[in-house]
Amino acid sequence: VKLTDLNPQWTQAGYGGTTRGRAGLWFDCPGACCATSLGKQRIHVPFRNPGDGGPDIPGDPRWQRTGDTFETMSLTPSVDASKFGHWHGFISGGEVR
Ligand SMILES: [Zn+2]
């Protein structure tokens, strides 16, 4: 499934006394766990390297991002929401699998 089909939204983060834009991502859980439920779980991924061009944000967990749009985005490592009973997989080149 494409990331753009999962209602992606950029998030902001307060860090170092400033508000960092494009600092993370919310998207709908694409797992079978959410295929039949009335409401989808949203998954949040905070970035190591926000898309605002500023310096990296330290601390964990954070994900390394390439691609400046939802259509081209790749994240490493994998996104694992399994400990909350949700999806574990990869976002690569704008594809979620
Ligand atoms: Zn789910």
Image (cartoon, rainbow, N blue to C red):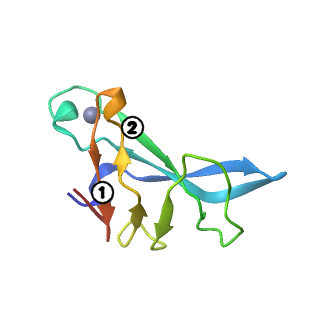
Q: In this view, does 67 lie above or below 33?
A: below
Residue 53 falls left or right of residue 37: right
- Residue found at x 39% / y 37%: 42
Q: Is residue 32 above or below residue 62?
A: above
The residue to which callout 1 is attached is 90
Q: How crowded is mark 2: few (under 14 residues within 10 Å), some or many (20 or more)?
A: some
Q: What element carries label 1?
A: loop
Residue 48: where, in percent of width, then height? Answer: 59, 59
Residue 65 falls left or right of residue 50: left
The C terminus appears in which quarter of the rendering?
bottom left
**Which marked residue is nearer to the observer: mark 1 or mark 2?**
1
Q: Is residue 44 above or below residue 70?
A: above
Amino acid identity at mark 1: Phe
- Residue found at x 31% / y 34%: 82
The residue to which callout 2 is attached is 42
Residue 31: where, in percent of width, then height? Answer: 21, 40
